[in-house]
Amino acid sequence: MNVEEVIALAEAHVHEGNMVSSSVSCLEDAKRHAKEGNGPFAVRWAIWSLKYSVGVFHPDYALAEAAAT
């Protein structure tokens, strides 16, 4: 997965879960880093967004985490 795909995955889940404000904040940071050309930071922030929205046991979180390695 590339940076844009990981961000899109996080965007798809951003309003799920109990910690929406944290998920949104992390997604905004991911988009900012992507715009600045900091791909690894963008991916990491998108993954943190997923952590807050769907949790670490969700298959989309594992998919995004695999993209970071």
Image: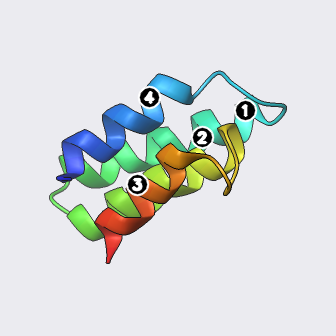
Residue 26 in picture, x, y percent from top left: 55, 47
Residue 60, compared with residue 17, is above or below; it is below
Residue 63 - label? 3
Indicate which label's residue lies in the foreground, 1 or 4: 4
Residue 21 - label? 1
Indicate which label's residue lies in the foreground, 3 or 1: 3
Q: In which quarter of the image is residue 18?
A: top right
Residue 42 in picture, x, y percent from top left: 33, 57
The residue positioned 28% from the left and 69% from the top of the image is: 40
Q: Quadrant of residue 5?
A: top left
Residue 66, compared with residue 63, is above or below; it is below
Q: What residue type is labelled 3?
A: Leu
The residue positioned 77% from the left and 30% from the top of the image is: 17
The residue furthest bottom is: 69
Q: What residue type is labelled 4?
A: Glu
Q: Looking at the image, is mark 1 or mark 4 earlier in the sequence? A: 4
Residue 20, compared with residue 26, is above or below; it is above
